[in-house]
Image (spheres, helix red, strand yellow):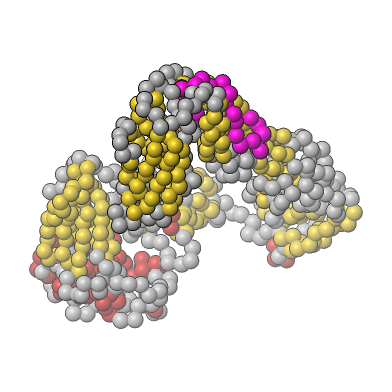
Amino acid sequence: MNKSLKNCSRIVLFTMLLIYSYTIGQVDTTIVKPAIFGKAKIIDNKILLKWNVNDPYYWKKSLKNGYKLQRVTVLRDGKPINKDEVVILKETLKPLPLAQWEPLVKQDSLAAVLAQAIYGEDFETSTQEKGLAKMMMLNDQNQQRYAFSMLAAEQSFLATKAAGWGFEDTTAKINEKYVYTITLLGVKEDEVAHGSIYIGLADKNDTTPPVTPEAVFGNQTVMLFWDFGAQKELFSCYNIERSTDGKTFYKLNNVPVFPTISKSTYTTFTDNLPENNTRYYYRIRGIDTFGYLSEPSKVVSGMGADFLEFSPQITAKAALDDETVNLEWDFPQEGEEKIKGFNILQADHDNGPFEIVKKEVAATTRKLVFKAKLKPSNYFKIQAIAKKGGFRESYAMLVQPIDSIPPIAPVGLEGVIDSVGIVKLKWKNNTEPDLYGYKVFRSYDKTGMYVELSSKVLHKTSYQDTITMKSLNRKVFYKLKALDIRYNESSFSTAFEIIKKDKIAPSIPVLSNYEIEEKKIKIYFLQSQSEDVKKHSLYRRREDQKEWKVIFETTDQEIDFYEDKTVEEKRKYYYAMTATDQDGNETAPSEPLILETIPTVLRPGITTFSGMADPNSKAIELYWNAKSNDIEEYHLYKRINESQNVLFKILPPNKKNQFIDTTLHVGNVYYYNIRAVFKDGSLSAFKEVKVVY
């Protein structure tokens, strides 16, 4: 290997060892399937692609065999492409020959690391410092090569392309979207999962800045920490910047800051401050896997100070009675000479505001019994007062007088519901001085189990709930409980009932049968099966009329027929029925029933009517006799099993008086009714025959 290239790689490797001594905190022993993972970014009308395989063994194979990169166009102008348009961007992508790496090193020193990892005869990562290599926790040279090549590739897209793990697609079009597929060559089909990337030039890069870091200032030091895990898909590493005026910032780190590998998702950076009591401003910038720098985060600031390094800690606390408190605390003996003494602070809430109730207690004191104005909840702190100024405080501790009496049950619960299921509840406020809040409960059964709705205790006297309007439950019930600051719970309030506004119409009733007699028609019906039906309405119109009129309404659930006695003879009438629920939702009309009234006086006409099934002919033969000579035509009605009579045929008179029905299905009972229509328009009575087929 070229000597200058090798020397350069050693220098960079040493620097990267310092980075990696922080980042390799533990080795992930989880077994995962070998796979290729890829990322993409859009820069200057080009699509930048990079990828890697997640296994050192297959990484080594890739150096010899390379990768295949293809592109499939899947959308054009926002519309899917029916026929695959496949472009092989590179049949084989492999590392550049060693001689071609040297000019790249002059542009980017990280290229030397990759070249050394790929072509070096040995991979020297040791340093003069003892034990540093142990922090790597990498057991063989191939793993070291793989690990350092991945770290270098994460920071340099130039080096990534030279290694055959990156590509710039300059032929992409703005109106198209693609799926890029990266395949490792020289392995079996399913041995290593392909990498896939879906992107188009019109897509937007994620320009989200890093999260705002938090800062903890000490004696000429500051520790910055931020949640790297929340943006690990955006940024690989970071730059840290500092300013003394909040305007002009300078980068602090010589090498990028990588996250530590641990159970925590937070990354830290410690800076030494030039001096205390001067405000310093900090921000961070993320660096993505293509080496591009993000916009800066929001700024945090603070000052270093010579803080008192010891803090008191409360170890015991108790309310001895309604006005007496006992507090005990720890404080290092070596810190006594640095403090004037202790203050005792009291507040109603853990976040204050706190007031001094006992001042300048002796520095040697560790226990104090004192009188205080106690409320249902009291928070106390111990404050150590430094001789040089400043103080350190303990955490706030809750002290409560003994109380096991719960609040009374809330009253005045009421509410309304709108058409989309939003329920708004309100109630009267409890008057207990130690009241903490309320819990809301719901049930669809007044006497059943009530489920708590609010995940947190409510501190107001209103609550909004949302229920589905499509469920079959017509009513919903609510109850409340009140809690005091000791979490003593009241009994349930009285249940409040809300009836849902129904938007769903009932099931449609059915006109099931009829009887036609002189001067009347009797209609039989099956009522709607919905529970909230309020009434049924029977509509009628005459054949020569367009308007339907209600002729009968009932709220009686037992009624199943109606006799229409207002019909005229020899008229055709249409009947239909609807059901209406309690919220006024009316069904669509039932299937109409079309009936024709009979003349007031029926003339004698048909004397006999018979039928016979002929299985061989697959037919039913009908025969009848009539004793009148002025018959205009015959009306033949047909009914299958329990269905309605339907006008089946209009037959002219003839000598045979015969009809053969071949529209049949085996296993049914057929009913036929026939009557004569005379030339003057009068009708004969019906004759019926039953035939089992």
Q: Residue at x 31, y 47 (%)?
A: 662
Lateral position of residue 656 relative to residue 168, left or right: right
Q: Is residue 30 above or below residue 85?
A: below
Residue 407 lies, in percent from the top left, at 82, 45
Residue 2, horizontal then vertical, whole percent: 13, 72
Name the residue at 58% across, 42% down.
Answer: 529
- The answer to if 285 sits in the magenta stretch is no
Taking the image as shown, residue 357 lies to the left or right of residue 689, namely right
Q: Using the rendered image of the protein, determine whether residue 660 is visible from the camera's viewpoint.
A: yes
Residue occupying image coordinates x 31% and y 31% = 652
Q: Is residue 645 above or below residue 220?
A: above
Q: Indicate the quadrant containing the C terminus: top left, top right, bottom left or bottom right.
A: bottom left
Looking at the rendering, in which quadrant would you find the N terminus? bottom left
Location of residue 31 (image quadrant): bottom left
| Region rendered in magenta | 554-577
Identity of the residue drawn at 63% across and 49% down:
455
